[in-house]
Image (tube, rainbow, N blue to C red):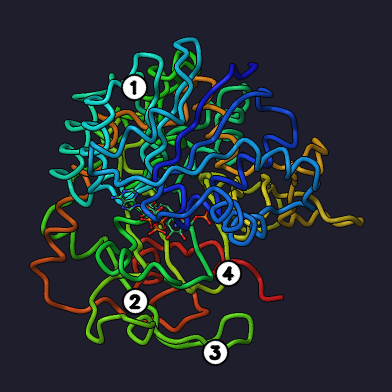
Amino acid sequence: MAISDFDLVFFGGSGDLAMRKLLPAMYSRDVCNDLPESSRIICVGRDDATQEEFLRMVENNSKPHIKDTVHEPSWTRFLQRITYVALNATDVSTYQKLIEALRDDPSLTRVYYLATPPQLFAKICDNLAATGLATPNSRVVLEKPLGRDLASAKQINLDVGKVFAESQIYRIDHYLGKETVQNLLALRFGNILFEPLWRREWISDVQITIAEKIGVGNRLGYYDNSGALRDMLQNHLLQLLCIVAMEPPTSIAPDAVRDAKLQVLRSLKRFTPTTLSQNIIRGQYRAGYIDGQQVPGYREEPDAPKSSRTETFVAMKAEIDTWRWAGVPFYLRTGKRMADRLAEIVVRFKPIPHSIFNQPTSSFQPNSLVIRLQPDEGLSMNLMAKTPGDSMRLKQAELELDFREQFKAPRMEAYERLLLDVLRGQLTLFMRGDELEAAWEWVEPILEHWEQDDSAPAPYTSGTWGPAAASALIGRDGLQWREESLPED
Ligand SMILES: NC(=O)C1=CN([C@@H]2O[C@H](COP(=O)(O)OP(=O)(O)OC[C@H]3O[C@@H](n4cnc5c(N)ncnc54)[C@H](OP(=O)(O)O)[C@@H]3O)[C@@H](O)[C@H]2O)C=CC1
Ligand SMILES: O=C1O[C@H](COP(=O)(O)O)[C@@H](O)[C@H](O)[C@H]1O
């Protein structure tokens, strides 16, 4: 679908996110000729920089983050789209500068992307309304964190909802922009093969892992107040779980998909005092080695509180109380400074009921489907196959689908896809307000439990797969995390 002419305003346009992700994403789409000729990008910050100074900042801080070789004429054209506006987003009297930078044409799409601390969302929306900028043709994009608990998420929904209709609000979860996540929809609902098996009768368990090698980097101020549960699990992991577990939506229309995801979130089994302590593990990284380089522990990171109890790792066993999923454990895990950068979903099927071969049933690895999001994007299906030769020996073999190899198409970063969707007015890959609240509602008892529990997160050495307790969590059910079940190289 073609994009019509737009003015895109990045509040926080001078910040880290805009420089590292948003502007490079817009350049990448521009170079592919996805943006209308006259469309404009307005970057807002407080700093009194001139247009020239700001463009130098973009040159120095944003251009290096473009993945492909920069095509200089396209880069020059891209810079010409950008206007820098210095204003204090909380001071309505400064918005005149923004009014002057915007084109006064109701046929244009107008997008306000709030890449600022969330404490500014309400004030920015109020000020946009007060200055007549919250027009019916405008859209607002909200960056995470979308709250730090249920009450603050509700407040954001309320504040933004006073000015913009739900159909104008785009809540970003960049995992939904990842190619494989959308491919999961294609796999489940574009094929007849999987859906009949996609249920408790055939699936034994599901593992979802997002492991990172990086530590907190320069985001300690934010992260120490957040932790892995708020930063990754409440949003990215739960969104992945929803797409794996949801009932077939009637179409790909935004509300059809979002209704189906909401149903999953509302069906997640609530934790009890017992399951809260048994089924959730939190950890914090200690010094160790990543790719042969020594790295400090979380508490030794610059500015980290020496006795911080913020979790940099979380693993849990979740369950979904529906006919389709009752009794199927969903193991979720995420952490920083882990052994590898890896994001994957592993769907394990039940074992065969009886062996007709001269091999015991226990020698048959149950089939599993591995959906890889990172580092590469693809699927692998593990099957039992006959080994070559004159004896009937069966061994595990892999059917592999590498999306990039298969389609030979250039890769699109998540932010590129999501920004295009905002500009097209396509809401399917964005969270609705009630989804956001349902996710917080489920997570909140965990946060409360940890607040009352004065024990520290389990330490784990950087460069490992997390605390031993995470292996014990899944081991209790006679299972292993996928990497633990793979043969050593
Ligand atoms: N950085 C990242 O990788 C990610 C960040 N986020 C979230 O995005 C948001 C922004 O993050 P990030 O870019 O890292 O933060 P930065 O601190 O780097 O940037 C904040 C931006 O907001 C602007 N800003 C702050 N207060 C005002 C104000 N009163 N008026 C106008 N502009 C203002 C700053 O402008 P100036 O400095 O000129 O005042 C700056 O452009 C945060 O909520 C963060 O949690 C989410 C995902 C990833
Ligand atoms: O939202 C976030 O995601 C990143 C990980 O994203 P990825 O696309 O690189 O997997 C994480 O590092 C960050 O802490 C979190 O805020």
Q: Considering only order in the chain, which callout, 3 or 4, is on the residue closer to the N terminus? A: 3
Q: Position of residue 177 (x, y in %)?
A: 54, 38
Q: Where is residue 107 in the image (x, y as percent from the top left)?
A: 49, 10
Q: Which amino acid does label 4 sit on?
A: Asp
Which residue is more in the foreground, 87 or 8?
87
Q: State the count of labels.
A: 4
- Residue bearing mark 2: 284
Q: Position of residue 92 (x, y in %)?
A: 23, 36
Cα distance, mark 1 to mark 3?
A: 46 Å
Per the rendering, the mark at residue 106 is none
Which SS class for mark 1?
Answer: helix
Q: Considering only order in the chain, which callout, 3 or 1, is on the residue closer to the N terminus? A: 1
- Horizontal side, residue 484 vs residue 286: left or right: right
- Horizontal side, residue 160 vs residue 64: left or right: left
- Residue bearing mark 1: 259
> Looking at the picture, does residue 353 appear above or below residue 482?
above
Q: Is residue 52 something that shows in the picture?
A: yes
- Residue bearing mark 3: 294
Q: Nearer the viewer, mark 4 or mark 3?
A: 3
Q: Count neighbours of disc 1 (C-alpha within 10 A) and say few if under 14, some if 14 to 19, many if 20 or more.
A: some
Per the rendering, the mark at residue 340 is 4
Quarter of the image with the N terminus in it: top right
Q: Do the residues labelled 3 and 2 touch (CB within 8 Å)?
A: no
Q: Considering only order in the chain, which callout, 2 or 3, is on the residue closer to the N terminus? A: 2
Q: What residue type is labelled 2?
A: Gln
Q: Count neighbours of disc 4 (C-alpha within 10 A) and say few if under 14, some if 14 to 19, many if 20 or more.
A: some
Q: Considering only order in the chain, which callout, 2 or 1, is on the residue closer to the N terminus? A: 1
Say which residue appears at 49% left-offset and 27% top-offset: 422
Cα distance, mark 4 to mark 2?
A: 16 Å
Cα distance, mark 4 to mark 1?
A: 34 Å
